[in-house]
Image (spheres, rainbow, N blue to C red):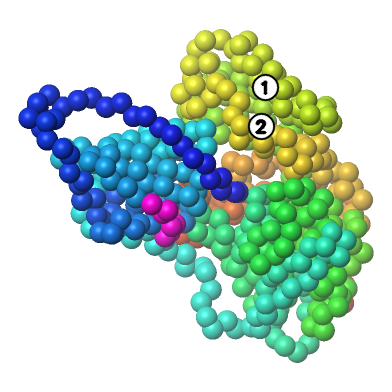
Amino acid sequence: MKSVKALLTLVLLFMLCSNKNALAEPQKNKDITGSWEGALSVQGQSIPLVFNINSDLTATMDSPAQGATNIPIESVTVDGLEVNINIAAAGASFIGRLTLANNEIKGHWLQGPNKLPLSLKKAGKKISSVVKRPQHPLLPYEYVVKEVKFKNQEQNVELAGTLTLPSSTGKYPAVVLISGSGPQDRDQTVMGHKTFLVLADFLTKKGIAVLRFDDRGVGDSTGNFAAATSADFASDVSAAVNYLSSHANVAKENIGLIGHSEGGLIAPIAATTSPNVSFIALLAGPGQNGNEIAVWQVKTILKATGLSEEAANAGSNMTRALNEVVMMNSDSTTLTSKLMSTYERNWQALPENVKSEIKKIGGGKLSQARIKELTSNWTKFFLAHNPAAYLGKLQIPVLAIHGAKDTQMDAKQNLKKISDALHEHPLHRVEEIAGVNHLFQRANTGFMTEYAKIEETMSPKVLEIIGDWVLKVTVEKQ
């Protein structure tokens, strides 16, 4: 999901110490060397942060819940008791003040329009944020690994990826892995989990060639991610299929697509335009249109933060109203003003108790970041897109699975709509998998805050379902 650099000017007012002699003396810069830990509260979710500061004030930041370590810090400045940490890579900064005990820094995390309270406490020793990912394969691999590049001639985009082959001889069924929303690398690295690396390793060991690639504008791939829609990403997938079709070790008649989340929206689009696609697997893919998905997600998240049913409904209704403005207005010059007036009108109509609840989690105004998201090409396409229109055209086998503990997609509703849209086929499989979340990890709550804490990257049961089904649909054709 883009970093923005901004110059921020902030005036902090602090209580003066009652010791007049201490005030008369100039404050000396305090030593803040060491590890400092704290947690941001974002929409009811706790996001731990760790700052590791060296004696020369060089530093790095870790976000263990997101699986991110050694994030570079642009600068650390100390002026008396005041501390300013600039995390340019995240478009963020932390401004705080040391307590007299010199073991806590109280202040605020600033990122875009957001200003969140954050207190850091000094740890006794350097904190290790290394997370265990036992399913990540280790070198040497038991199969052939090739770094490849192929071109989307239609849009002049060069994609870079990794092709894994069971061996360098023979022909094998093959799949293209399609990542979910946001700019993703070829491994679909999420919260420290390399989901596509694990999936590719498993499938290749079962005798299936796998191509995974960096999204356009990500890693070694060219192109502009921010300006693209799901339809554009589908054309990149078609280019990947064309590449596999001409590969000496790929069985041209047995090429399929496996898409996760938004990748499950992209796969049917690509399958309807690429004659060489012979099957698709949708992992937590949508059956509903984007508007319904967005409204459901907002209500689910708000309820998870502890908001009342009334406040959660208000938030989801606001989302629906804004989405409808986007879908009904093609004039980009007036879209922003219409979004702002729609938000204000709906906000003013809310009861005071609901306003109070929503304000506590940062609501109450339409931020520039939200406006930018709503007016993007991607959002306009996503909200209006109806997956059934493409699923209904398919005459090839389809696997569609969702996790019963998915809190990002409504498993039952999406699976039902996928099933209703498909024509009869003996090799279709549509199934809700008990006990797993949106990433197909075995989970307790299914909330996003749990992803990084779970060591498992993908449930072995789910891996077996995908691998066995791919082999079944390819073997039966031979």
Local secondary structure at mark 1: helix
Q: Residue at x 61, y 20 (%)?
A: 314
Q: Provide the major secondary structure of the magenta segment.
A: strand
Q: Residue at x 36, y 39 (%)?
A: 95
Local secondary structure at mark 2: helix
Q: Residue at x 27, y 27 (%)?
A: 14
Q: Residue at x 33, y 35 (%)?
A: 107
| Magenta span includes 33 | no
Residue 159 drawn at (x, y percent)? 74, 66
| Residue span colored magenta | 69-75
| Magenta span includes 73 | yes
Residue type, numbered disc 1? Met
Kindly report the distance in space between the C-alpha atoms of the residues bearing marks 2 and 1.
8 Å
> In the image, which disc is placed on residue 340?
1
Mark 2 Cα within 10 Å, few/some/many (few <14, many 20+)?
A: some
Q: Is residue 172 above or below residue 95?
A: below
> In the image, which disc is placed on residue 371?
2
Residue 389 drawn at (x, y percent)? 88, 44
Q: Decide: marks 2, 1 in contact (CB < 8 A)?
A: yes
Left or right: 317 as drawn, with respect to 26: right
Residue 371 drawn at (x, y percent)? 66, 32
Question: Which of the two residues, 27 or 444, is positioned nearer the viewer here?
Answer: 27
Residue 301 drawn at (x, y percent)? 56, 34
* Mark earlier in primary sequence (2, 1): 1
